[in-house]
Amino acid sequence: MKEQIEHLNKVITTLSAKTNEEVEALRIQYLSKKGEISELFNEFRNVPNDQKREVGQLLNKLRDSAQNKINDLKAALTDNNNNTEKIDLTRTPDTFPLGTRHPLSLVQNEIFDIFGRLGFVAAEGPEIEDDWHVFGALNFPPEHPARDMQDTFFIERNPDILLRTHTSSVQTRVMTTQKPPIRILCPGRVYRNEAISARAHCFFHQVEGLYIDKNVSFADLKQALLYFAKEMFGEQTEIRLRPSYFPFTEPSAEMDISCNLCGGKGCSFCKNTGWVEILGCGMVDPNVLENCGIDSKIYSGYAFGMGIERITNLKYQVKDLRMFSENDTRFLNQFQ
Ligand code: DAH
């Protein structure tokens, strides 16, 4: 009896199974009512009394280790099954949805493409600025309304620290640190204290252009802007420059393009004029050059500034300015 128990103990440690059916077959072979171990229990009554205690213990151990072995084999099989279900290396992976570029980025990139071909390079400046870079150096008189609390978000007063109201401040930054020739394009966010509505927001985006060299003329400005308008809105686009005033340019102008919705015939978008305004521009005021340490007797330059939202609206007819900053994917997904 003892030898039989010992033998079975060895056999049991070597058992293996590949399927649940094989495990069940092993259980039946050893542990069912007619199984090999149960048979030993049946023969137990023939064991001499003086050995009963010892053999009984061995038998109980044998049954326990057989049961444990069967349990282990079962557990190993379910683990394996789960793993093969989780990792199917042949399965086509799920596609994940691609994001889209923000319409303002698309248009900004296009503006950079066009002026890049004319030799303009990117320049950036801080959104938190001091009064001198935003107003002082750019020839704004102290009492100019743009400096008023109504328009400007101030962070500190005396000396004034504020959120820039236009990207013209980057002109100041570049002119005070670089020598001409300068040919830059400055993109960025600007802030104005406006009530938020479909047509106005307290922040928006601009691109500022600045070209300073010897003998830069108004004709150069006009040609560069005509090129931009035709590249951006199509070959048929016409431009018109209207005299205007900005403290930092002299002479100054505002530029209209022929309405790209009605082709200049007149519609509700252009208020029946056939023209829509897209930017401000002019020849850099000699005072500004001097304020920034550039000799206005040697150098001249032109500058222009446009709102990216404005250009984007013209291209894509976005009715409500707030759409640009609400991150609504139903809106953004339209710009695939
Ligand atoms: N800074 C002006 C604005 O925010 C736009 C502008 C007008 C920029 C004329 C210029 C310029 O460089 O020459 O309304």
Image (cartoon, rainbow, N blue to C red):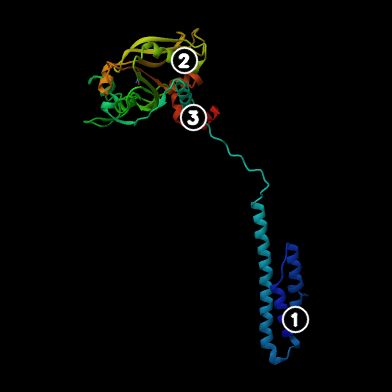
In the rendered image, residue 201, in percent from the top left (x then y), is placed at 39, 25
Q: Report the residue marked by disc 1.
A: 40
* Residue 196 screen position, x and y as percent: 38, 26
Task: Compare marks 1 and 3 and give the one earlier in the sequence.
Answer: 1
Which label was assigned to residue 227? Answer: 2
Visible in this render: residue 6? yes
Give the farthest residue toward the right.
34
Q: Is mark 3 within 8 Å of ligand 1?
A: no
At 40% across and 17% down in the image, what residue appears? 279
Residue 102 - label = 3
| Amino acid type of the residue tagged 3 in the rendering | His
The Cα–Cα distance between marks 2 and 3, rounded to whole angstroms, is: 25 Å
Q: Are marks 1 and 3 in contact (CB under 8 Å)?
A: no
Nearer the observer, 107 or 150? 107
Q: Position of residue 245 (x, y in %)?
A: 31, 13
User: Relative to the observer, which residue lies in front, 325 or 167?
Assistant: 167
Query: Can the viewer see residue 145 in this picture?
Result: no
* Residue at (69% x, 85% y) in the render: 55
Q: Residue sitting at 45 percent across and 31 percent down?
A: 326
The picture places residue 281, in percent across and down from the top left corner, at 36, 16
**Which amino acid, mark 1?**
Leu
